[in-house]
Image (tube, helix red, strand yellow):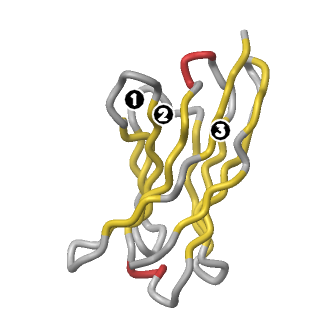
């Protein structure tokens, strides 16, 4: 299992940008699908974006498509989420996830993103 630590959250005005980072431990990072999820109080955690191990394919929820970009640097064991044109409804705790079909499903501790109107 990899251990994940998110950073980069904060408070931003609507229309602004933030970049989240997720640093992973271990030497198997490049074998994991990496994803970002978010959660608001009283709601289930929802999918935001995912990237394949070699970065060849990315997937987004409809609510963030065209505004958010997921990327990874396997040499640095890090995945990023660039968030542009932020909206108040993007306010949530954002979680990093590492998943592997052959075994392994890890979560970070989360980072708060607050978008003010």
Q: Is residue 52 left or right of residue 71?
A: left
Badges 1 and 2: C-beta atoms under 8 Å apart? yes
Q: Which residue is mark 2?
A: 65
Q: Which residue is mark 1?
A: 62
Picture coordinates of residue 76, whole percent (x, y):
66, 79
Q: Residue at x 62, y 45 (%)?
A: 111
Picture coordinates of residue 94, whole percent (x, y):
54, 42
Instruction: Please tell me in which quadrant of the rendered image residue 61 appears.
Output: top left
Helix, strand or loop under label 1: loop
Circle 3 packing at 10 Å, graded few (<14), some (14-19), many (20+), is many
Residue depth check, mark 3 versus mark 2: number of the one nearer the observer: 3
Sooner in the amino-acid sequence: mark 3 or mark 2: 2
Work out whether 84 lies above or below 14: below
The residue nearer to you, when weighing 82 against 6, is: 6
Q: Which residue is mark 3?
A: 83
Circle 1 packing at 10 Å, graded few (<14), some (14-19), many (20+), is few
Task: Report, in whole angstroms, how far the alpha carbon at label 1 lies from the one at label 2.
Answer: 5 Å
**Quadrant showing the C terminus:** top right
Work out whether 53 lies above or below 69: below
Task: Report, in whole angstroms, how far the alpha carbon at label 3 lies from the one at label 1.
Answer: 14 Å
């Amino acid at each position: 299992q990899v251990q994940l630590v998110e950073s980069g959250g904060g408070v931003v005005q609507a229309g602004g940008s933030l970049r989240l980072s997720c640093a992973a431990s271990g030497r198997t990072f490049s074998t994991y699908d990496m994803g970002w999820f978010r959660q608001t109080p009283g709601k289930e955690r929802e999918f935001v974006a995912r990237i394949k191990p070699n970065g060849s394919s990315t997937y987004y929820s409809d609510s963030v498509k065209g505004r958010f970009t997921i990327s990874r640097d396997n040499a640095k064991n890090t995945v990023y989420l660039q968030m542009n044109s932020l909206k108040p409804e993007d306010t949530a705790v954002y979680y990093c996830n590492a998943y592997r079909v052959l075994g392994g499903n890890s979560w970070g501790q989360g980072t708060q993103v607050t978008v003010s109107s």
